[in-house]
Image: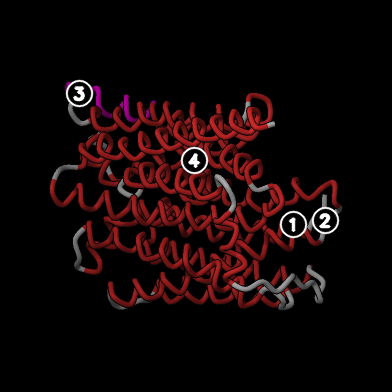
Amino acid sequence: MNRRLLWLALGTFAIGAEAFVISSLLPQIAEDTGVSLIEAGYLVVSFALAYAFGAPVLTALTGASDRRRVLVISALVFAAGALAAAFTPSYAVLMMVRTVIAGAAGLYAATAQATAVAISQPDHRARAISIVVGGTSLAVALGAPLGALIASVAGWRGTYLTIAGAGLTAAAAIWIMLPKGIRGERLTLRERVGVLAQPNVLPTLVTTLLYMTGCFAVFTYIAPLTLQAAGLGRSMIPTVLLIYGIGAAVGNYVGGQLADRWGAQRTVVTAIILNIGMLILFSVVGRLPDGWGAPVFLVALAPWGIMSWSFPPAQASRILAVAPDSAPLALSLNGSALYLGVALGSFVGGLVLRYGTVMDIGWISSFFLLAALGLIWRSARRRAKTLSLSALNA
């Protein structure tokens, strides 16, 4: 294995830790900055929007630049943003800082995957990408609960100091370990989004958007769900994230294996159906008899993580199937669709909390997954009809 890939993965680990630990920090941030929990949730929305729209634009602007330089600069900007977040005096400044962090994170993630391909042998490229993306999976499994644990001891600002240290370490290692002179192909933003015109690409990306909207409407507010619906104490939040994260790591592996052996579309549909049941369960947890809510919630976390994270690798396989000649661009746009779903889900979850209760988030979120399921069914029917007409014309 090319050891340089591990240093690229360290950067994606730091980025993933920041992106996923924020959900557990929202109550602390709200108290410290004097805003409501719903307003604190908009920190997730702003990050996701900046990531989704910033990544394609920044990648287009830096596509032909030296990738080592791009990676180091983006990692340094990310680390500086995390450091600034640790000392930010207000909610408004924290919002701006996280927007900068998101732009740097999106540029780093896209460039790291392209660099992994460039420094690997042709028959090892898929494995190289999986190592870099594995940094995100490890962040969900270990980084987020570790960040929550640090926050329970040193506050949310202590968590950001730790994340800044990880970003700086990644920047230094990449500067030392990666060769200079690795350059990509310059593509305009129009060329990058032109892949949307290919058949079935747009419906597939909308499926990603709808799925992530439903899941992150719940995950963004996992802390109030833990405290209010399950009735657990704040000290249990790191444990909650750890259980979920272990399930997510397993799901990421299982999803890829099932997509190869069972079929990507079948895996995606199964993940969506099972997740609908899990989201509805989270709405029921708070209404269970005394003594039942907390154990049911804790037992459900690992299966939810498995089901939730079996979707992304299988969905990536679907994208490769519908756009084989434009796979890198289509996968990049899928990343934007994913973060747009995070943004929309966080916003929807906030609306539910404003006009309902935390117990309502699960069943309302399930409608987005039902919509994703309907879109897959409609696309499959349309594709079957097109194939039938082609066969008749032949």
Given the image, on which type of amino acid does mark 1 rest?
Leu
> Is 338 colored magenta in this rendering?
no
Q: Position of residue 339 (x, y in %)?
A: 45, 56
Label pair 3/1, CB-CB below 8 angstroms: no
Q: Quadrant of the C terminus?
A: top right
Label pair 1/2, CB-CB below 8 angstroms: yes
Residue at the spot of label 2: 120
Kindly report the distance in space between the C-alpha atoms of the residues bearing marks 4 and 3. 25 Å
Q: Secondary structure at mark 1?
A: helix
Residue at the spot of label 1: 5
Q: Secondary structure at mark 4?
A: helix
Residue 35 position by quadrant:
bottom left
Given the image, on which type of amino acid does mark 2 rest?
Ser
Residue at the spot of label 3: 288
Residue at the spot of label 4: 245
First of labels 3, 1 by sequence position: 1
Kindly report the distance in space between the C-alpha atoms of the residues bearing marks 1 and 2. 9 Å
Which of discs 4 and 2 lies nearer the camera? The answer is 2
Query: Magenta residues?
Result: 288-299
Residue drawn at 28 percent across, 72 percent down? 91
First of labels 4, 2 by sequence position: 2
Label pair 4/1, CB-CB below 8 angstroms: no
Residue 177 position by quadrant:
bottom right
Category of crowding for the residue at label 3, using alpha-carbon neighbours closer than 10 angstroms: few (below 14), some (14–19), many (at least 20): some
Given the image, on which type of amino acid does mark 4 rest?
Gly
Given the image, on which type of amino acid does mark 3 rest?
Leu
Q: Position of residue 18 (x, y in %)?
A: 47, 59
Q: Position of residue 286 (x, y in %)?
A: 20, 31
